[in-house]
Image (cartoon, grey):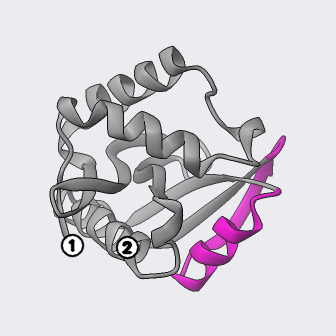
Amino acid sequence: MKIRRARRSDIDYFIELYREAYKGYEEYAYTTTRDIRDYFKWLHGRDREGIFVAVIDDVPVGFAACDSGWFSRMERKIVAELHELFVREDLRGKGVASKLLIRAENYGREKGRDEMGLWVGEKNEPAKRFYLKHGFRESGKLGRWIRMVKRI
């Protein structure tokens, strides 16, 4: 497996894997192809260097999107915001997400950030456990979203 920067041409893989990742958690996701496509374009426009894709045999199997210029109202400063992290279902628990997260954290540090933040759905227990295992802590709640942060 290798991790590289995502390209616009990865958009169809992004859509497919995003849909798969949010099965059962649709209340936290975009659900139409158009909205998911627009979301990818928004992520790409926010910080094109911060979108990473895990690739096995030239096929994308996971994505991470880190925005190194995100102003967080919760932390009242610019942080490396992890907008997205997901991996193909059959590869979960095999270290792919961890490697993508580490790459996103390194990117945040490269851009001078000392903190990474993210929002996770309050009912998404697997994701919360994953982030807690990787050193994030819960720092607040807004509606159905839990704020998590980590010093990087």
Determine the secondary structure under disc 1: loop
Task: Report crowding for label 1: few under 14, some 14 to 19, many 20 or more residues within 10 A (C-alpha).
Answer: few
Question: Which residue does the numbered mark 2 point to in the structure image?
Answer: 96
Query: Residue under circle 1?
Result: 1
- 94 and 48: which one is in front? 94
Split into 4 quadrants, where in the image is the N terminus? Answer: bottom left
Disc 2 on helix, strand or loop?
helix
What separation in Å lies between label 2 and label 1 (alpha carbons)?
Answer: 8 Å
Residue 29 located left or right of residue 25: left
- Above or below residue 36? Residue 84 is below
- Counting residues from the start of the chain, the first of labels 2 and 1 encountered is 1
Residue 136: x and y in percent read 57, 74
Count of marks placed on residues: 2
Give whichever of 105, 92 is nearer the camera: 92
Extent of the magenta region: 123-144
Q: Residue at x 40, y 53 (%)?
A: 79
Residue at 45 percent of width and 39 percent of height: 16
Find residue 123 and report its horizontal and vertical position in percent. Answer: 82, 57
Q: Is residue 91 above or below residue 145?
A: below
Indicate yes or no whether the magenta region holds residue 134. yes
Residue type, mark 2 in image: Val
- Identified by mark 1, the residue type is Met
Q: Quadrant of residue 142?
A: top right
Give me the residue at 59% from left, 75% from top.
Answer: 130
Name the residue at 27% across, 26% down: 45
In percent of width and height, residue 132 lies at: 63, 79
Q: Residue 150: x percent and y percent? A: 50, 71
Badges 2 and 1: C-beta atoms under 8 Å apart?
yes
